[in-house]
Image: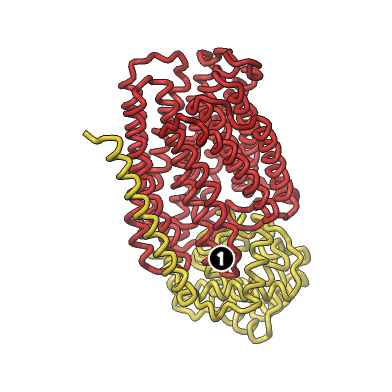
Amino acid sequence: MLTKSAASKFFWFGTLGCGIAFVLLTLDTLKQVPIQTKSQNLDKSAIAGKHLWEKNNCMGCHTILGEGAYYAPELTKVYERRGERFIKSMLTDPEAMYPGERKMVKYNFTEQEKNDLVAFFKWIGEMDLNGFPPKPVLGRVSSAQGKIVTALNKPQTWNQLCINCHSIGGEGGNVGPALDLVGDKFTREYLVNWVKDPSKIKPGTQMPNLELSDQEINEIVAFLSQLKGDSK
Amino acid sequence: MKFQSQKVAYYFFAVSMLLLCLQIVYGFIMGFAHMGFDVLHPIIPFNVARSTHVNLLVFWLLSGFMGAAYFIIPEECEMEIFSIKLAYIQLIAFVLVGVSAIIGFHFNWWEGRKFLEIPRPLDYLVVVDVLLFIFNIGYTVFKSPKKTTSSMVLFFGLLMAALLYLPGMIDTDHQTLDSFWRWWVVHLWVEGVWELIMGGILSFLLIKLTGVDREIVEKWLYVIVGLTFLSGILGTGHHYYFIGTPKYWLIIGGVFSALEPLAFLGMAIYAISMAKKGGKQHPNKIALSWTIGCSVMSFVGAGFLGFAHTLPAVNLYTHGTLVTAMHGHLAFWGAYGMLIFAMISYAMPLMTERKLYEKTSAIFAFWTTNIGMIFMTLAFAVAGISQVVLERRMGMDFLLVQKEIQVHFFGLILAATLFTAGAFAFVVNFIKYGLPIKKPV
């Protein structure tokens, strides 16, 4: 039967062995992290962004690198997913971007601070994270409309901005109406004016003015106009 | 109560109970916010509620640990604590630091680092305060001719907990390294040295409540803390899968953290078999219920539910979702919350000489808190798993998924109400016990 001194030996050998291994692995990790995370791209602005991230306890709602709270979206790949303009609009006035939805504190960031946060997200997004976040592997339930939409070439503006509130073929947000048949409902001209300044056409609308360039507006309207019922 | 200085424990326990009540309030604020009722947002936004909720947990557990140490050490060492005055000073300082931190959170005074939100100047005060505590306890332990394994394990657990607070204060501009050091504190606390504290307190309670021979209890204590460190130290690797650290952590973290349930399983088997073995019929049955309950629930919450999402292939999808909240709630409650409840249930009748342990409300508290917490865990599990499938596996938008799972937070709130009723009964009982008697028997 196990004696007390044997038990004590088991404790000491196990603990010391694992402790030493852990310290050695830590030393190696400290050497490898700068390469794996592309520390050479961690410039002054991104560092300032990191400190802003901490100072405002963004982790108290969001996660980054999968760490934080689960009240607001994962932001590891936000730069790639939403782009600089969306991030900055969100930081300027969260409520304008998601009217009536889950709230974010409105911080009064300066232009420089917004740039710093964007730089921070950009740097985080470029890290090698051993496969995190994973790409969705299960197919979505797709409608006929969804298939047609997939075949169409979606402009970047749609993928980064519009999709947060609107959906086509079930893909996208539900803050604003679904746009599956929007091409039947409105003319090109109407759509151009609408996107340019929504509240001019319908005062009090919740859709923000996204301040798109003319070229972006042309692209997005050309895309939306194709969404018609008879295109099946 | 054999020693005058043991009654210091009462005040630590009182602080602990008060902070627990506050923690519950902030939990409800978050639960309602998740359901869409966020009227408090302008005053207490979610990140304030969360930091407060989590740090109150740390404060009430630490206060409970300190109280337990002040109760156990004199009895194990068979002498008064080095200085009662120092213990009171240290308690008051602890409360002041805690209160300043919590108030600070409401005014954006914090470090936005999960679990270590306490602002830097207060960190130094925490260290000083804990060192005073360690000195007070350590001086007693080493001056005493009687050095029991339980008291040594408890002391070293507390000492290591204090020392491991330091890596969290390493300054870095690098997000990955920031996380890396943060887990040195958080992981090595809860899945390392806090388990020493837990082992020390559990064996003290088992020796007192079951009457099993000290040699046997302490032999198995070595095995359990041995298993804890064997799995827990390298098990830190399960926090280093996806934060920009090398790939070998996937294997090391995966293998060793998969062994972590063994320590908890050991603890459960140990507590149950000691209770069966012991011929002693201790009248304080509810303290024994909490002791055994603690060992079982810590296995379920920390061991089993931790294992459920610790393997890299699973964690890739569950990392950063509500699945973590599911594991976290039952783990902290089972391993550390119930431990302090066990200690309080055992110590109060001795300190006050009132025997309230046979009251129905004490039994009600035990069952209601546990059933409530199990249902809370289930609500988090359903919400978390749905989130994983919809958001991570199917690629649905975050906000849409949150609307889908809102209903489970209603379930959470119902379960939390049950838990609160039990906790309330426990606190009311605590108050009814009254102040500790002046002179020891």
Which image quadrant for residue B409? top right
Residue B279 visible? yes
B180 to B325, vertically: above or below: below
Indicate left or right for B258 with B146 as reference.
Answer: left
Farthest residue in the bottom direction? A215
In the rendered structure, the residue with mark 1 lies on which chain?
Answer: A
Report which colour depicts chain A. yellow
Q: Secondary structure at mark 1?
A: loop
Q: Position of residue B170 (x, y in %)?
A: 58, 62
In which quadrant is the N terminus of chain A drawn?
A: top left
Which chain can be seen in red? B
Coordinates of residue B383 in the picture (x, y in percent): 48, 47
Instruction: Residue under label 1, please give it.
Output: A75
Asked if residue A184 can be seen in this view, the reply is no
Q: Residue drawn 69% across and 72% down?
A: A114
Decide: is A54 above or below B261. Answer: below
Q: Position of residue B140 (x, y in %)?
A: 55, 33
Task: Determine the residue positioned at 52% across, 55% down.
Answer: B401
Mark 1 Cα-neighbour bin, 10 Å: few <14, some 14–19, many ≥20: many
Q: Looking at the image, is B259 positioned above or below residue A97?
A: above
